[in-house]
Image (cartoon, helix red, strand yellow):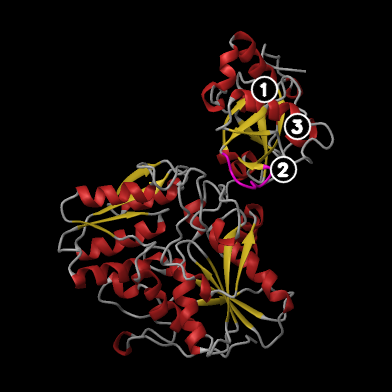
Amino acid sequence: MSTLERLPITGTTDDLRLGVSAGPVHESVLDAIGSSPLIRLRRTASHLQAAVYVKLEQNNPGGSVKDRAALWMVRRARADGSLRPGGTIVEGTSGNTGVGLAVVGAQLGHPVVVVVPDKTSREKIAVLRAYGAEVVVVPGGVPRDDPRHVHSTAVRLAAEIPGGWLANQYDNPANPAAHRETTGPEIWAQTRGRLTTFVAGVGTGGTVSGTGEYLKSVSGGRVRVVGVDPASSTYSGGDGSPWAVESIGHYLHPDTVEDVWPESYHPGVLDAIVPFEDRDALLTGRRLARQEGLLVGGSAAAAVAVALREAEGLGPQDVVVVLLPDSGRAYLSKNFDDDWLRHNGFLEEGVEDPVRDLLPEGALDAPGPIALAADLTVGQAVEQAIAEGALGRTPLAVVLPRHQARRPRALGDVVAATTLAGLRALVREDPARARSPLREVADPPLPHVGVGQGAQEAREALGEFPAAWVLVDGRVAGWVRRARLGLPRTPEDGA
């Protein structure tokens, strides 16, 4: 029997009842936003004493929890006059908020323009366009004050478009308010006040902050609120480098002048913020699909992975609720695609002659290739390479400079490649080049292969390059040369 008593069916319409399972009838798609179900995890949490439930936000019309914030932001803007009838809604988003705004905009007669970073899954972009939104794709790995940044571009478009209104979910108080007024009360009612732990990812921070504020208030502080964050996100003390899972965390480009956190995020609400690794989230997502019949996004899977760890020390009287923001259908070409997972170093089963087996023993045990900051001069780069024991034609990674950077470095931080031999040759030809910026003289980035990819795939990825980076969990853990893949050497290739 469930830890929670089975609740009676509510919200049905008497004159249209088809039986006890009949659902509500709404006058508008907007009325269907919210009231998502709780589902108990049976197989993945069977070893735990506590009851672990997930709140399935993909049941919202737009397919994610962001429908709630979208509706509240638009209604408040229409009420205060900042969004006029027929005005254009503009937002910078990883996709889900844009879909929510497109749903609301379609119902209320507002065109929608959505700015997304280039790592957004193609499925999300297709959904946005299907709802009639105009999609603008911009580079994701740029400083916040760069005019190409998602937020900067959205601000500019909102100012340029007649009648444009910027939703600005990151700093809009209606974002956490939506969850304080809807998500939190729903969870408290669904658990009959027996909730002890609430777990949710931290992106804009609006969901965990608003929901957590309500649950803390109604329980007299008894409910523990746990935020979930990528290990390299600055929210949980990471270096700000890129990660694979979408719609969660806080990326920081090293050239950003000031690390500004969203006003929608209220960190004081959280009792803990727990970091996760990409691999754990991605593999948990596959496990949920195959063991629970729940196809969910990466940030949802990350929250479940953390919640299962948090629940290990809890007893049979405890009730844990994990908020699942969206469906895995928006990530089929990434999170659930074996080829993508292998290519990025997250999957190592199912192929013959994997790259790992072609490398010398222990080649991937070190903290990755020598990393030279892109803002060094050539002379400084040579000195560092020699000090760290670089060999003549060993591939060296030219990276964005980060304070106390994680090793191995994230692929997204590797902007170029070089060798000690190549740098020395430049200085021999022209001693003045020792003062040149490394970024200007370095070679293009090497291609990459995943540690679990097959040799044939790796050969195809290498092309004419002398080597390729080898990724383990999305990070550059080593390199593989042409000779180890059975390819003829190039003049640039070393021993």
Would residue 325 be found to the left or right of residue 198 on screen?
A: left
Between 250 and 340, the residue placed more toward the observer is 250
Give the amino acid type for the residue marked by disc 1 in the picture.
Answer: Thr
Q: How many marks?
A: 3
Q: Which residue is mark 3?
A: 388
Residue 283: in sight, yes or no? yes
Mark 1 is surrounded, within 10 Å at the Cα level, by few (under 14), some (14 to 19) or many (20 or more) other residues, namely: many
* Whole-percent x, y for residue 77 in the image: 24, 68
Q: Nearer the viewer, mark 2 or mark 1?
A: 1
Q: Residue 493's spot in the image, x, y percent?
A: 70, 17
Q: Residue under circle 2?
A: 350
- Spatial separation of the CA atoms under disc 2 and disc 3: 36 Å
First in residue order: circle 2 vs circle 3: 2
Magenta highlight on residue 91: no
Q: Secondary structure at mark 2?
A: loop
Which residue is at a point 60% across and 29% down the rendered structure image? 447
Q: Where are the magenta residues, as a range?
A: 401-408
Query: Would you name the residue on which mark 1 appears?
Result: 419
N-terminal label among 3 and 1: 3
Q: CA distance from mark 3 to mark 1?
A: 13 Å
In the image, is residue 379 above or below residue 311? above
Marks 2,3: beta carbons within 8 A: no
Residue 197, horizontal then vertical, whole percent: 60, 79
Q: Secondary structure at mark 1?
A: loop
Q: Nearer the viewer, mark 3 or mark 1?
A: 3
**289 relative to 145 in the view: left or right:** right
CA gap, disc 2 to disc 1? 34 Å
Camera-side mark, 2 or 3: 3
Residue 420 occupies quadrant: top right
Front residue of this view, candidates 426 and 32? 426
